[in-house]
Image: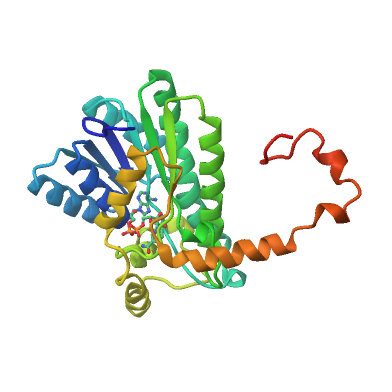
């Protein structure tokens, strides 16, 4: 998409952090912005900030894991601002600790928001985008956890790796259409993600981890407060959308871990000369590889 000015953008998690950065930068680039967020205080602050800067913004309270509510929010936004051409699947939550301590509710909450929330956005907006035939773009926010596994991040990492698979496959499925897709993988961002548990629904509150504990919050905040500022990150996203880039990976500190992980995987991969059935399997091409 060479020009974003005049486009309508729907940004989940637009009330804070990464999503708010996207709202600020794309509004400044001339987009009409809808921010959707589960936290009313985040929506109020974000709307005030954007309106004070003279931007056009619509704020919608939404739990993205609720498919019906999501559809109503999409209808409301399109009725008011016009067809959505930019979808930012940004809202996400995190809670850390060893997998063996997770309750079923811990899994459900993270999967419902980080994965189902994104699937809902795609299932609701994508058919409309394809039917209208406009130039459109979907930006899915994963994390470097989509590539790099770390102890005590298992639930989050599982959802972010799934987001990577979803996004890469979607970009292939949409190859001959006017809808482009990007995978955004931030490292640390100076956001409010340390407060994620405050958005956890009551029926999923049984946890094997921590609750709304100020000590945990301040520990987690210390890790992310040195992170990239959301607006800086969103400028990379703007460039990625303008260039129709599949991968938006603005964190050079992950070069070394990624090289190490890929080297380890290549090391573990069998060699053709050790496999007598190799030629038979690849005679008609290799899945994901070049055709012979
Ligand atoms: N902060 C980081 O270091 C970091 C690193 C990598 C990836 N990310 C990803 O960036 C995305 C945004 O996170 P952030 O860091 O800006 O956090 P944030 O908490 O500052 O912003 C996320 C927003 O999403 C909203 N939200 C949470 N659950 C929701 C739901 N069910 N429905 C609608 N809105 C909901 C929150 O209220 C919040 O306003 C997430 O997907 C996160 O995984 C963040």
Q: Is residue 89 left or right of residue 153?
A: left
Question: As displayed, is residue 51 above or below residue 267?
Answer: above
> Is residue 271 shown left or right of residue 245?
right
Q: Relative to 141, is 7 on the left or the right?
A: left
**Near-viewer residue (103 or 122):** 122
Q: In which quadrant is the C terminus drawn?
A: top right
Residue 231 lies, in percent from the top left, at 24, 55
Q: Which residue is nearer to you in this view: 47 or 140?
A: 140
Visual colour scheme: rainbow
Within the image, what quadrant is residue 271 found in? bottom right
Residue plotted at (56% across, 46% down): 165
Position of residue 175 measured from the top left corner of the image (x, y, whole percent): 51, 29
The answer to whether residue 34 of the structure is visible from this angle is yes
Query: Which residue: 41% across, 71% down?
Result: 211
> In the rendered view, would you say 117 is above or below 228?
above
Does residue 106 appear in this view? no
Tell me which corner region of the image, top left, top right, bottom left or bottom right, holds residue 194. bottom left
Task: Please tell me how many numbered marks the rendered image carries.
Answer: 0
Using the image, determine if residue 257 lies above or below residue 237. Answer: below
Image quadrant, ligand 1? bottom left
Quadrant (top left/top right/bottom left/bottom right) for the N terminus: top left
x, y percentage for residue 57? 18, 40
Residue ID at (53%, 36%):
170
Q: Nearer the viewer, residue 41 or 221?
A: 221
Q: Nearer the viewer, residue 73 or 188?
A: 188
Looking at the image, the residue that sits furthest to the top is 132
Q: In the picture provided, is 145 more to the left or to the right than 245?
A: right
Q: Identify the residue at horizontal 32%, vertical 73% (top origin).
A: 221
């Amino acid at each position: 998409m060479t020009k974003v000015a005049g486009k309508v953008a729907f940004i989940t998690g637009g009330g804070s952090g990464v999503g708010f950065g996207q709202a600020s930068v794309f509004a400044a680039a001339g987009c009409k912005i809808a921010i959707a967020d589960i936290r009313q205080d985040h929506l109020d602050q974000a709307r005030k900030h954007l309106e004070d800067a003279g931007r056009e913004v619509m704020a919608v309270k939404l739990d993205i894991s609720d498919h019906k509510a999501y559809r109503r929010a999409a209808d409301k936004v399109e009725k008011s601002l016009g067809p959505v051409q930019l979808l930012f699947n940004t809202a996400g939550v995190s809670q850390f600790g060893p997998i063996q301590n997770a309750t079923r509710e811990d899994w459900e909450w993270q999967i419902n928001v980080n994965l189902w929330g994104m699937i809902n956005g795609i299932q609701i907006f994508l058919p409309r985008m394809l039917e209208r035939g406009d130039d459109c773009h979907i930006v899915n926010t994963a994390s470097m956890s989509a590539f790099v596994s770390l102890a005590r991040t298992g639930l989050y990492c599982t959802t972010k790796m799934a987001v990577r698979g979803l996004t890469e496959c979607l970009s292939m499925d949409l190859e001959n259409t006017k809808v482009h897709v990007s995978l955004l993988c931030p490292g640390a961002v100076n956001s409010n993600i340390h407060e994620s548990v405050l958005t956890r629904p009551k029926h999923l509150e049984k946890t094997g981890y921590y609750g709304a504990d100020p000590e945990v919050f301040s520990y987690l905040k210390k890790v992310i407060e040195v992170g990239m500022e959301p607006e800086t990150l969103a400028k990379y996203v703007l460039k990625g959308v303008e260039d129709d880039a599949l991968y938006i990976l603005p964190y050079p500190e992950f070069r070394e871990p990624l090289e190490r992980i890929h080297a380890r995987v290549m090391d573990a991969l069998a060699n053709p000369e050790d496999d007598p059935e190799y030629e038979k399997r690849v005679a008609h091409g290799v899945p994901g590889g070049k055709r012979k």
